[in-house]
């Protein structure tokens, strides 16, 4: 069908105008309502308005959430997913504590013997003049009383670079000693915070080839979690090597506990760039490992059976994208931190989500009064938890599309994709791009001018 | 200046055409200055309406200015040496005094300080649109260019932010005087008009007596007008008459200040607020809207060889840390760009139904549509929860709390006030704040930085230990601490608060609750 030029122009102009208007309205509406987060914007709105009414459903105890930031060029972005925060929700669902002083927040742990005091790991990008002109980061641990705001600096060190050098986890061994997951130097060390002396160290190069995992030395292991554990009566250190897709157990003499490693490099069926594994000991139905299997988009638990790790429980739903923390609570529920799903959820023994706090880009969560991470919880096997897997066949179209794409692609898109772009805005974006391109091509074809590019360089024989 | 720009300069304003030298049939005249200037003023009224509708309290602060005006009245309209209430020692009074006298008269006549701070800036801002219009009109020889420049000034969020807000009691008038002086300068170097010299001299003196940065804007503009467009001895002499004449009119104040505080006070303040030359840092920050004036100026340099606008834009971008000067120049630049582009579009030759010139009709439509879009954007921005343009330092709860402080606390009571309400606190309570940077620039960069750091730190404290620790870095402990609840601003930036600091004070034996309403709680020291 050959339409007159004028009609074609009008149709294309209408397409460009309508799609632009849809995008502008979508963006402005999201900006006005702080709705740039997946799910309910109530929590993010409270962060802007200081509202003191409940924004999440009530729970028996306080929930503390540390959030990451997806800002990778500038630290100054104000979008909910770009704001790194430490947040506490009171039992009645109000925001009880809020701070966004640091560049990033990572691990957060309750301080034993206190009602509402936590220790958290932070990273601060420093100015070039504080880094000999280059880029560097102060990684550290702080303690804050969520009731009175009183804070204590516990320990910190400056590391070079920022993107893959920010410490993600520190585990307290006792009153003086911290176990640090030193992502910057692919090692784990114990430091006495009174003397500031390093008393024990394990370097991943002692057990792994630098050809494994990620690029060496920039982001080789992405060592993101440590835990001081007792295995078969021996003290050991559990270490999560994200880029090797493995959780290993290191004896205090520096050797790996044979047969205890979970996963192997590239075996994405077992683990795929996991975060925050929690060890559940034998006395609570283990040995078991509850792991946020991030790139696989699931929470998974493995249990020791006959000297091998056997998958004993898995959970996922349609919204779960890049989970980075899972804690088993004493009541048998599981507290899951869903980073790209923008939420912290509590999953009950039947696999139902019974509590949700929608919050931009969370990294880790703790329910106070339940012990550090999964310290008060039993294994899935002991609890008889049923598996729950997201079934793409019954899901929405975008979820079905995501299910057939490589998980790294889906998670990369979910990491960056602006949350204000919904179905309408997505269609408008496609229409705008196609309409503008088509219009430009037609105008060029209809015009009597032609573009040509001559090489400014000519080579001639002398 | 050469070529097309010269041609523009030499033609008188005969009608509203933006056709320049193009040969085409002229349409009917579409109004005169009344219509085109009215378009700019209309946009200004729209900005004022949006501001007043969305700001029941003035944006930002004018507490120190009110306090200065009251001291002027208290001194029988003489100049006070110090302004009490702002830090334990008070702050020296070295500001150019013209607008404080205007404020003093209004307050002396019974004006409510908050109402005056909310309404008075609009007068200066609307008045500033007149010289903006005239300058762009005469420069481009086009009334639509004048209208475009005045609309762009009226609806620029940065210019609204800095001139309609409370501080506009000084800055809006300084902008008006500065633009009047620059327009007079343009006329001086174009026509050698004696009336323009007198007008320029008076306007420059008024600028000098209102705000030093705007006075520097005038000086830079005059130097460029002469160096780029004139370069004659006669022009230099006339420009010097304006400069020295303005200085002479300001001499009584300058002499008083030098005698009272010494000349050092000026150098002390010059290094604060970004300092002269601070614009380079803004430029080096990378792409932003502040680069738009340079883009427009580059276009005019290429197509018209217009060196003046290029130099003017480059100078304001680099000399002034505050982008409002670049945006003011950019408004003129883009008015001229619009005219140039329209003149080159042959499709715009001819008339529209009714016989009006097609370019002029299009300009009118674009300006009205642009005003509507600009006004809509202002509404959007000023009604965001984090309102980046016109955040109010006060609300009903703050005013009630300050009324309590004025009535129920001893006259010599000292306060640490968290958040930007601190700026208004001494003016509305006649009590002293121990921490706050306002006016401290006149005590020198080190003192200013110390107070600014302390103010920003204490306003973000979440524990009583933090407040006491920060207070000890400046003037020691206070009798009262004023805490805002929910959201408040620190240097205009929104901060949300969820009761942590309040809980901390509640649990401290050194403090007791003295006053509370929905938005403020005040604690009193028990020792």
Image (cartoon, coloured by chain):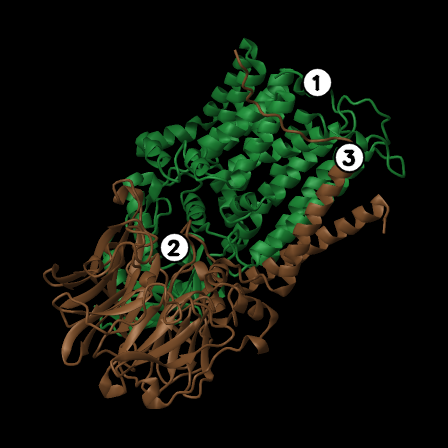
Chain containing mark 3:
A
Q: Quadrant of residue A84?
A: bottom left
- Along the line of sight, the residue nearer the viewer: A282 or A181: A282
Identified at 79% across, 23% down, the residue is B22
Q: Earlier in the sequence, mark 1 or mark 2?
A: 1
Q: Distance between the residues labelled 3 and 2?
A: 69 Å
User: Which residue position holds label 2?
Assistant: B426
Return the x and y of residue B414 as percentages of the image width and height. 30, 58
| Nearer-the-camera pick, B371 or A321 | A321
Q: For mark 1, does the 10 Å Cα neighbourhood hold few (<14), some (14 to 19), or many (20 or more) residues?
A: some
Q: Which chain is brown?
A: A
Residue that extends furthest to the right in the rendered view of this protein? B354
- Residue occupied by mark 1: B7
Q: Looking at the image, which is closer to me, B75 or B257? A: B257
- Which residue is labeled 3 in the image? A447
Shade representing chain B: green
Direction front: furthest residue: A461
Q: Is the residue under label 2 in contact with that under label 1 (CB below 8 Å)?
A: no
**Subunit that carries the residue with mark 2:** B
Q: Distance between the residues labelled 1 and 3?
A: 33 Å
Between disc 3 and disc 2, the foreground one is 3
Question: Hey, which residue is sitting farthest top in the picture?
Answer: B233
Near mark 3 (Cα within 10 A), the count class, few <14, some 14-19 or many ≥20, is few
């Amino acid at each position: 069908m050959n339409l007159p030029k004028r009609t074609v122009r009008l149709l294309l102009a209408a397409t460009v105008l309508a799609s632009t208007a849809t995008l502008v309205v979508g963006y402005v509406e999201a900006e006005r309502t702080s709705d740039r987060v997946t799910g309910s914007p109530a929590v993010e709105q409270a962060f802007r308005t200081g509202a003191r009414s409940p924004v999440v459903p009530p729970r028996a105890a306080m929930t503390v959430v540390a959030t990451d930031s997806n800002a990778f060029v500038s630290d100054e972005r104000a979008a909910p997913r770009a704001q790194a925060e430490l947040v506490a929700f009171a039992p009645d669902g109000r925001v009880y504590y809020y701070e966004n002083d640091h560049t990033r927040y990572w691990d957060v742990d309750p301080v034993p013997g206190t009602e509402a005091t936590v220790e958290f790991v932070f990273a601060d990008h420093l100015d070039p003049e504080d880094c000999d002109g280059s880029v560097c980061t102060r990684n550290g641990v702080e303690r804050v009383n969520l009731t009175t705001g009183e804070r204590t600096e516990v320990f910190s060190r400056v590391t070079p670079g920022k993107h893959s050098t920010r410490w993600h986890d520190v585990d307290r061994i006792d009153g003086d000693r911290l176990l640090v997951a030193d992502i910057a130097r692919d090692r784990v060390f114990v430091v006495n915070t009174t003397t500031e002396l390093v008393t024990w160290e394990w370097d991943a190069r002692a057990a792994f080839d630098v050809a494994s995992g990620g690029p060496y030395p920039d982001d080789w292991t992405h060592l993101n979690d440590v835990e001081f554990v007792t295995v078969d009566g021996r003290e050991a250190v559990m270490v999560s090597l994200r880029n090797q897709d493995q959780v290993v157990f290191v004896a205090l003499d520096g050797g790996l506990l044979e047969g205890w490693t979970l996963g192997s490099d590239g075996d994405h069926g077992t683990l795929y760039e996991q975060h925050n594994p929690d060890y559940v000991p034998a006395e609570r139905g283990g040995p078991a490992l509850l792991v946020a299997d991030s790139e696989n988009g699931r929470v998974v638990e493995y249990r020791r059976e006959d000297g091998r790790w056997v998958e004993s429980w898995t959970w996922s739903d349609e919204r779960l994208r890049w989970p980075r923390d899972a804690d088993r609570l004493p009541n048998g529920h599981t507290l899951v931190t869903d980073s790209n799903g923008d939420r912290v959820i509590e999953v009950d023994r039947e696999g139902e989500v019974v509590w949700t706090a929608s919050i931009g880009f969370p990294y880790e969560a703790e329910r106070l009064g339940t012990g550090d991470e999964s310290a008060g919880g039993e294994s899935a096997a002991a609890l008889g938890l049923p598996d729950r897997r997201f079934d793409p066949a019954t899901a929405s179209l975008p979820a079905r599309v995501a299910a057939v794409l490589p998980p790294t692609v889906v998670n990369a898109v979910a990491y960056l994709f602006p949350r204000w772009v919904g179905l309408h805005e997505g269609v408008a974006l496609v229409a705008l791009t196609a309409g503008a391109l088509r219009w430009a091509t037609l105008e060029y074809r209809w015009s009597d001018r032609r573009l040509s590019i001559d090489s400014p360089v000519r080579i001639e024989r002398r | 200046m050469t070529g097309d720009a010269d041609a523009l300069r030499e033609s008188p304003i005969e009608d509203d055409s933006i056709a320049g030298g193009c040969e085409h049939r002229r349409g009917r005249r579409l109004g005169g200055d009344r219509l085109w200037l009215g378009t700019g003023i209309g946009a200004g009224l729209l900005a004022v309406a949006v501001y007043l509708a969305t700001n029941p309290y003035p944006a930002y602060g004018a507490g120190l200015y009110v306090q200065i005006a009251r001291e002027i009245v208290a001194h029988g309209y003489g100049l006070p040496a110090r302004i009490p209430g702002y830090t334990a020692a008070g702050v020296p009074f070295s500001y150019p005094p013209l607008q404080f006298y205007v404020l003093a008269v209004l307050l002396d006549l019974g004006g409510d300080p908050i109402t005056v701070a909310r309404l008075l800036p609009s007068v200066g801002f609307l008045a500033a649109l007149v010289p903006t219009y005239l300058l762009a009109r005469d420069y481009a020889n086009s009334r639509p260019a004048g209208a475009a420049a005045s609309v762009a000034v009226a609806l620029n969020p940065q210019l609204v932010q800095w001139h309609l807000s409370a501080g506009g009691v000084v800055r809006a008038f300084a902008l008006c005087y500065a633009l009047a002086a620059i327009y007079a300068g343009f006329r001086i170097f174009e026509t050698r008009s004696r009336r323009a010299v007198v007008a320029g001299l008076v306007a420059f003196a008024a600028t000098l007596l209102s705000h030093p940065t705007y006075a520097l804007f005038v000086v830079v503009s005059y130097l460029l007008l002469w160096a780029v467009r004139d370069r004659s001895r006669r022009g230099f002499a006339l420009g010097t008459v304006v400069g020295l004449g303005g200085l002479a009119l300001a001499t009584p104040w300058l002499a008083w200040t030098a005698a009272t505080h010494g000349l050092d006070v000026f150098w002390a303040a010059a290094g604060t607020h970004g300092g002269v030359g601070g614009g380079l840092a803004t430029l080096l920050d990378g792409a932003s809207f502040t680069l738009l004036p340079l883009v427009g100026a580059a276009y005019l340099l290429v197509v018209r060889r217009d060196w003046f606008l290029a130099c003017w834009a480059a100078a304001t971008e680099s000399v002034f840390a505050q982008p409002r000067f670049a945006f003011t120049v950019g408004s003129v630049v883009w008015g001229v760009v619009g005219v140039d582009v329209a003149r080159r579009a042959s499709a715009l030759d001819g008339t529209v139904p009714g016989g009006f010139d097609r370019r002029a009709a299009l300009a009118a439509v674009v300006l009205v549509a642009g005003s509507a879009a600009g006004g809509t954007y202002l509404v959007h921005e000023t009604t965001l929860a984090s309102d980046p343009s016109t955040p109010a330092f006060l609300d009903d709860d703050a005013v009630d709390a300050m009324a309590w402080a004025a009535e129920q606390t001893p006259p010599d009571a000292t306060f640490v006030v968290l958040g930007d309400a601190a700026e208004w606190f001494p003016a509305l309570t006649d009590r002293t704040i121990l921490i706050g940077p306002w006016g401290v620039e006149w005590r020198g960069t080190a003192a200013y930085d110390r107070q600014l750091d302390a103010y920003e730190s204490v306003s973000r404290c979440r524990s009583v230990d933090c407040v006491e620790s920060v207070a000890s870095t400046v003037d020691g402990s206070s009798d009262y601490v004023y805490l805002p609840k929910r959201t408040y601003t620190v240097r205009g930036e929104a901060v949300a608060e969820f009761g942590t600091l309040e809980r901390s004070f509640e649990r401290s034996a050194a403090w007791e609750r003295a006053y509370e309403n929905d938005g403020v709680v005040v604690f009193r020291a028990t020792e």
